[in-house]
Image: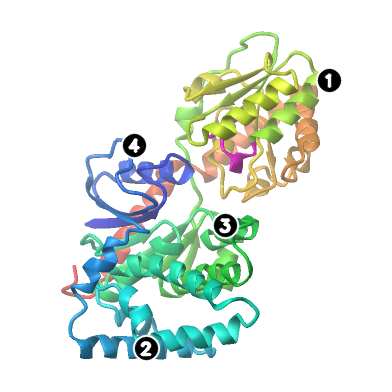
């Protein structure tokens, strides 16, 4: 069996939670061949992971690569074929914009693999008039140039994705909606293979948050990009043979955008519990507080640093450890270091860089997560396996992981509430010892990695056998 993992902006070029999950999935299912079909912002990125031996190929597509339009132009076929293709695509779009539901075969199947629509989308008279009509309907108060360039920039990326030829595989498994999901959906439509969708976060929601915060995206440009990502998500949910999510709240979002209940399932992330069950040691008389993760804005390290300042005002023997790489966003890392110095706590706060987290789990008294966005943070499960209590912001399924205990859950960016949680851990050692044992038991029962990876192996076998005869 060969599985094609379809991935955007992540493994094997970027480290992080999703990348770690992919690496462990591949390594844990060594009997399965994997090929990677990746979508990247730039070419020739350095591999950040040593690929397991059962990865038999990598095809990387640069989303903004203009050469794809020139390659696709040579495969377009004769003028009559191009005209028929444009006619069919415009007809399906008109049905979609008027409230109809064109089939995926109409939207995607009309575009042959390897054919780019960059040229036809602007030079064909019908396409041009269609864009003009949509501008008058949807964007009457902004200049046409704003509408056109927003439309073209979004659709150029879509055309590159649809023109890309994926590796041969029995199953196409996308790790998000967006462009990766669209590529996996196209492979299903064109090649008749099964399409699995696994979401750690919610891609379309994350992109919408970024777009609304971006000052350079305005008016209809903002609305168009949000609508494009939401429409692609809806197509993926409707077209996938199965959608998996990490927790029930995200599954409900999938249902709201068109996924069928019988085609959705929750499979949480897991960890190797024994690996993180390190012997506990008493390092010294200090109270040790740890942050485990990348030093990047989404982790909101600055809130952790401010919380550290508040705790040190009451607990001068507290010591803080920022454990994780600082090379992904060096400027932000420098800002965090300056903040610690400005608050005069840099003598009690350590930036470790890349480090063996197991060494720190052996003596940390509490692990803190201050992220502004997460799905299901594995660092909490790792801490639980090491018998360490956690304090975290209320993102993703943190509340579920912390059993809804509001003493240890804070709103995003609430450094004072984070500090209160840390202080509570220090002041109630016996209660924390009992809680740590209970947390570890819940982790063993619900989040053991081997069992969760086996579920994906079962899904692969199920959907390989579901492929039409002669398609395998």
Q: Is residue 160 left or right of residue 297?
A: left
Q: What are the residue bounds of the magenta stretch? A: 291-300
Q: In the figure, 55 relative to 156: above or below?
A: above
Residue under circle 2? 125
Q: CA distance from mark 3 to mark 1?
A: 37 Å
| Visible residue check, residue 291 | yes
Q: Earlier in the sequence, mark 3 or mark 1?
A: 3
Q: Quadrant of the N terminus?
A: bottom left
Determine the residue positioned at 43% across, 48% down: 452
Q: Which mark is residue 206?
A: 3
The percent position of residue 249, horizontal first and vertical second, equals 61, 60
| Callout 1 touching callout 4 (CB < 8 Å) | no
**What is the CA distance from the residue labelled 1 to the residue labelled 2?**
71 Å
| Mark 3 or mark 4: whose residue is earlier in sequence | 4
SS label for mark 2: helix
- Spatial CA distance of label 2 from label 4 is 48 Å
Residue of label 4 = 49
Horizontal side of 310 relative to 142 (left or right) equals: right
In the rendered structure, are the residues bearing label 2 and label 4 in contact, judged by CB atoms less than 8 Å apart?
Answer: no
Q: Residue at x 61, y 56 (%)?
A: 214
Which residue carries the number 1 mark? 314
């Amino acid at each position: 069996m060969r599985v094609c993992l379809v991935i955007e902006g992540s493994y094997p070029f970027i480290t992080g939670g999703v990348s770690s999950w992919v690496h462990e999935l591949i390594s844990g299912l060594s009997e399965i061949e994997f090929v990677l079909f990746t979508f990247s912002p730039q070419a020739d990125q350095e591999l950040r992971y040593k690929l397991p031996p059962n990865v038999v190929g990598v095809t990387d597509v640069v989303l903004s690569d203009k050469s794809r339009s020139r390659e696709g132009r040579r495969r377009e076929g004769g003028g009559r074929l191009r005209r028929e293709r444009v006619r069919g695509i415009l007809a399906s779009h008109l049905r979609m914009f008027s409230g109809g539901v064109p089939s995926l075969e109409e939207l995607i199947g009309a575009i042959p693999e390897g054919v780019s629509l960059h040229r036809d989308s602007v030079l064909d008279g019908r396409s041009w008039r269609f864009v003009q009509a949509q501008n008058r309907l949807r964007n009457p108060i902004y200049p046409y140039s704003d509408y056109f360039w927003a439309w073209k920039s979004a659709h150029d990326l879509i055309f590159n994705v649809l023109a890309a030829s994926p590796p041969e595989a029995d199953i196409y498994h996308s790790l998000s909606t967006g462009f990766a999901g669209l590529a996996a959906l196209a492979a299903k439509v064109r090649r008749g293979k099964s399409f699995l969708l696994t979401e750690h976060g919610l891609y379309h929601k994350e992109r919408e948050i970024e777009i609304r915060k971006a000052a350079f995206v305005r008016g209809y440009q903002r609305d168009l990009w949000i609508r494009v990502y939401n429409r692609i998500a809806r197509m993926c949910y409707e077209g996938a043979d199965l959608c998996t999510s990490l927790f029930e709240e995200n599954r409900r979002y999938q249902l709201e955008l068109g996924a069928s209940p019988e085609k959705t399932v929750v499979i949480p992330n897991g960890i190797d519990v024994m690996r993180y069950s390190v012997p506990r040691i008493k390092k010294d008389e200090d109270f040790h507080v740890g942050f485990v993760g990348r030093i990047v804005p989404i982790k909101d390290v600055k809130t952790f640093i401010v919380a550290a300042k508040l705790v040190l005002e009451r607990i001068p023997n507290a010591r803080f450890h920022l454990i994780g790489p600082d090379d992904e966003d060096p400027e932000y890392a420098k800002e965090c270091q300056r903040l610690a110095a400005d608050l005069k706590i840099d003598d009690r706060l350590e930036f470790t860089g890349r480090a063996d987290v197991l060494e720190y789990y052996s003596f940390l008294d509490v692990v803190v997560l201050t992220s502004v966005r997460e799905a299901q943070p594995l660092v909490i499960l790792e801490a639980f396996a090491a018998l360490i209590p956690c304090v975290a912001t209320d993102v993703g399924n943190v509340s579920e992981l912390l059993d809804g205990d509001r003493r240890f859950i804070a709103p995003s960016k609430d450094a004072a509430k984070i500090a209160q949680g840390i202080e509570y851990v220090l002041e109630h050692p016996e209660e924390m010892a009992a809680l740590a044992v209970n947390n570890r038991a819940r982790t063993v029962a619900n989040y053991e990695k081997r069992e969760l990876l086996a579920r994906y192996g079962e899904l692969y076998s199920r959907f390989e056998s579901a492929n039409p005869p002669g398609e395998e």
